[in-house]
Amino acid sequence: MLFVVPTPIGNIDDITLRALKIFAEHTVFICEDTRSTRKLLWLLRIDYSQKQFFSLTSHTQSHSIQKYLDMSMTQDIILVTDAGTPWLSDPGKVFIQQCAQNNVPYTVFPGANALVPAVVAAAFPTHRFRFLGFLPQKKWRQTLLREIVDSREAVFLYESVHRVQKTCMQLKELGFSWKVFLARELSKMFEQLVNGTLDDVIAQIDDGTIPMKWEFVMGFWPQ
C-alpha cells in the first residue's frame, strides 16, 4: 500500500500524530531528496538506521515509477516530498496515477501545504479559485498570465523568489490592477502576509518592505 504523507513546510510542529505513527512503523520511503527525509526523521527523533530511502524527482520519475510500483504491490511504502504535500507542485502525481491504474491501494494524509493557508488568508473571496502551480519560465507563461487577467475567480500560484517581481510587472503590462495577495515563509518565524493592489505590492517590493527571500504563494482577485 502507498501512504502519501505531507511534511512540514517550515514549522516542525505542523507534523501530524498520524504521520509520526506511520513514519515510525514503516521502513520504505520514496523521497524527493533522501537527505531531507533523513534530516526530518532525525528532527522528529525517529530512528531511521534500518529504513530504506529511494529518490523520486521530476527528473527521475519516468524510469523509477515501474520499480516503485512493483515494490508497492508487495509492501507498504511512504511517499513524501521535502516540504508539503506530494503532487502539489512536487513530484509524485504520476506515481499515484499508476497506483490507481494498477489497483495498488493508496491513501493520502491531510496535512501541511502552502496553498490552503494562503487561500484562507487572502483578503478577497476564495470560495472558488484556480491553482496554477509554478508558472513556466518561458513557454505558456504569457498565456497563463493573460488567463489571470481575464479570470472571473481568484487565482493562486507558487512563484520562485527570483520571479515574483517579474510576474507582478508582467501582469501590470497586461492591464491587471486589482487585488493581490502574497504569502512568504508560511508557518515560519518571519511569515509575511500582504494584501493590496498590484501597485501597492510592487511598491513594497521596490522599497524592501517585502524582502525577496524564499518562495512565495501569490493570489490574484481580478475583479
Image (cartoon, rainbow, N blue to C red):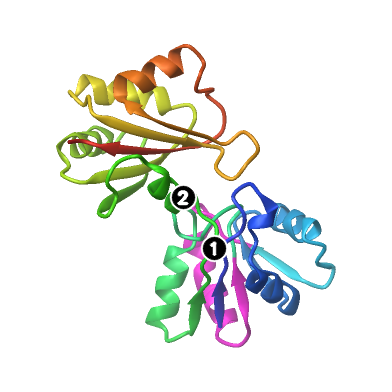
Q: Is residue 174 above or below residue 94?
A: above
Q: Name the disc covering residue 126, or none.
A: none
Residue 49 placed where, x, y %?
A: 85, 68
Image quarter for residue 45?
Answer: bottom right
**Residue extent of the magenta highlight:** 55-79
Residue name at image x 48 percent, y 26 percent: 162
Residue found 51% across the figure and 18% down from its top? 209
- Element at label 2: helix
Q: Is residue 28 magenta?
A: no
167 displayed left or right of 91: left
Give the x, y percent position of residue 107: 50, 78
Asked whether 217 or 58 is in front, the reply is: 217
Left/right placement of residue 173 relative to residue 119 reads left
Pick the quarter of the image with the N terminus.
bottom right
Q: Position of residue 48 (x, y in %)?
A: 81, 67
* Mark toward the viewer: 1 or 2: 2
Tell me the tag on residue 117. Answer: 2
Kind of residue at badge 2:
Pro
Residue furthest to the top: 207
Q: Which residue is mark 1?
A: 111
Q: CA distance from mark 1 to mark 2?
A: 11 Å
